[in-house]
Image (cartoon, rainbow, N blue to C red):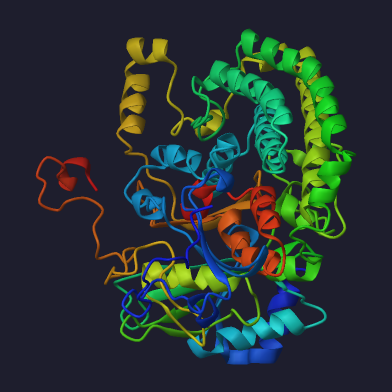
Amino acid sequence: MGGDGGGSMELQPHTQHHIKLSEESLQKQTTTLNLGPTHPATHGVFQNIMEIDGERVLETVPTIGYIHRAFEKIAERRPYYQITPLTDRLNYCSSPINNMGWHMTIEKLLGLKLPKRVEYLRVIIMELSRIADHLVCNSVIAVDTGALTPFTYVFQYREKIYEIFEEICGSRLTTNIGRVGGFERNFTPASFAKLHDFMKTFPKVMKEFESLLNRNRVFMDRCIGAGPISAERALNYGFTGPNLRATGVDYDVRVAMPYSSYEDFDFKIPVGTVGDVYDRFMVRNGEIWESVSIIHQALEKIEKIEKEFPDQKEVFYAKEADHFHIPAKEDVYTKMEALIWHFKIIMGEIDAPAGEVYHSVEGGNGEVGYYLISDGGRTPYRLHFRRPCFIYYQAYPEMVEGGLLSDAVITLSSLNVIAGELDA
Amino acid sequence: MTNEIIQQRLTEKFGECLTEWSMPYGLLEFRAAAEMNLKVMQFLFDDEELQFRFLTDLTAVHYPNKKGEELCVVYHLHNMSAGIRLRLKVYVPVEKPDVYTASRLFSGANWMERETYDFFGVNFVGHPNLIRILNVDEMDYFPMRKEYEMEDPTRRDKDDEMFGR
C-alpha cells in the first residue's frame, strides 16, 4: 500500500511544509503510510497519511479536494435547469435522488404542488437509485473483505436499474432525470415492463446476496467491531443517513420531514446498535428491502390512480410549472406560443422569484440539502450543497485510530464516501 | 414546539441582540450580533426545551453591496426530536471577518468552517486547524467572493446586455 513511507529514502521534513512526519516516524519506530489518493482499496480519490505501528493505526490525516470542481461557483452563472447536471455529479451512485432534490428545491421556491402520480413516479426513481447506491456500497464492503462474488452478482441488478433509468431519461449514471414540476416525458410502457421485471427478479437475488454474507462467519468476524462510532459522537459530527441509523438513531428525512408524498407510504427505518461496519452493512440491506416495498406500494398507488382517473395516465408534470417545463416537440414546431417558451427556457431567460430556501432529501448517504438564495434573477445568487459525505468523513480518523489498518479500509468502504459528493 | 415558542424563548434570553426575525417557507430565521453567535448556539444546544443539538449546515454568503456587513455566515440548526429547523445568520465586515468557531460545540463544524474559510475567508476565531480544505494551499484569494467573475470578462461574444441580464 504505497511503499513503506519512512524507509530508506532521505527525507527532509522541514523543507516540505505539507508533509510533517512525526518524531517517532523519523526515528523509524513507527511507519508513515500514504494510503491513496488513487488506490484500489479507497474506491475514489482520497488520500490518508497514516502513522502506523505494526498494523495498528495511530493517526490518520485525510486530505480531500482532489476532484473539487467548484459547482457552487459554477451554479451562480447557470440557469436553474442547467444546474441539474451538476447535482448528478455529487453522489454519482444515486444521481436521480440529487436531481429530484434539486427540482424539489426550486418547486419549493416557486410554491408548486405536484400531482400525486408524478410524486409517486419520483418515489419509484428515488428508491431505485437508493437500491443501486446501497448495492454498490454493500458489495464493495464484501470486496474489501475478500469476497468478489457478491459484487459481480448484484452488479447485474444495478445494471438493470440503469436500464430502467435509460428507458426513462436516456442516460444511465449521470441521469439529469426529471424537470422542475415533474418529468421531461412520461414513462414508456417499456420502462414499466423493465421495472416490473426488476421487481420480480431482484428479491431472489437480494436474498442470495444476504445468505452469502449476513451470517457468514468469516465476514462477520471481519466486520463486527470494526470502525465503530457511538450515537452521541455521530450526531455531534453531523452524521445522517444509514451511517447515523447504524448507531441507533432513527433519523430519516423521508419520515422526519416528508417530501414527495413519502407520508403516504408504510415502511420501517432499520437501525443498528453500535455503529460498526457490520451495523452499517445490515442497515443498508434492511433499507434495500424497505425500498423494494416502497416501490411496490408506489406502483399499486399509481395503478389505483390510473384506474380511477384514466386521464391521469398522461400526467407527468404539474401544469402550473409551464414556465419551467419545455413544451412538447410537436407543439414547438406548430405553435408560436410553445416555440417562444421553448426558446426562453433553453436560453435560461426564466426568472425565479426572490427567496431563500433550504430543502433536503434522504440521499443514499444521508441528508442531501440544498440551500438556495435567489435574488429574483435567472440564476441562483448563492447555492450551497449540504453534502453528507463531506460532513461525516471528518469522523474517519476518530473511527479508525487505534484499530487495524485492514479495518480502516473496510471502514472507509462502509461509510460509502463518494469522492464526487465529498469534494463537490 | 413551534417557531413562535422558539422566538419567544430566545427573545427572553437575548433580547435586542437578535433581530430580523422572519419565517420564509416556514423556517424560522433570525440574525444575531456577530460576537453572539456561539452564545446563541450554546443556549439553543443546552436549553432543555429547545434542544437544537444538530448542526445541519454551515456556510457563508457574500453581499458586496452591504457596506460593513459583506459576509453573512449562515447556520442551519436542527432539533431532531421535535423535527424542527432554524436558520441563524451573522454578518461580518469583509475587512475583519471574525466569528467564533462552533467546532467545540459541534465536531462536525470543523470541516464546514474550514470550507467556509477556504471559499469566503471567514476567520473562525478559536478553530483548531483553520487551513484550506478543498482548494490548493498556495491559493491566495477566496474564490466564492463575488468579485471573482465566473467567465472571462474580456469576451465580447457573451455580452450580458444582449440577454437582459
In this picture, is A31 found above or below A152?
A: below
Name which residue lies at 31% across and 25% down: A340
Q: Between residue A62 and residue A290, name the one nearer to us.
A: A62
Image location (x, y in percent) of residue A199: 77, 19
In this picture, is B76 found above or below B38?
A: above
In this picture, is A163 found above or below A98?
A: above
Name which residue lies at 49% across and 32% down: A174
Position of A57 compared to A22: left or right? right
Image location (x, y in percent) of residue A223: 79, 50
Q: Between residue B9 and residue A216, name the one nearer to us.
A: A216
In this picture, is A2 found above or below A28?
A: above
Determine the image quadrant of residue A151: top right
Q: In this rendering, does residue B30 appear at all?
A: yes
Position of A94 compared to A34: left or right? right
Identity of the residue furthest to the front in this view: A8
What is the number of callouts on the image? Answer: 0
Q: In this rendering, does residue B77 appear at all?
A: no
Image location (x, y in percent) of residue A184: 50, 24
Image location (x, y in percent) of residue A5: 47, 63
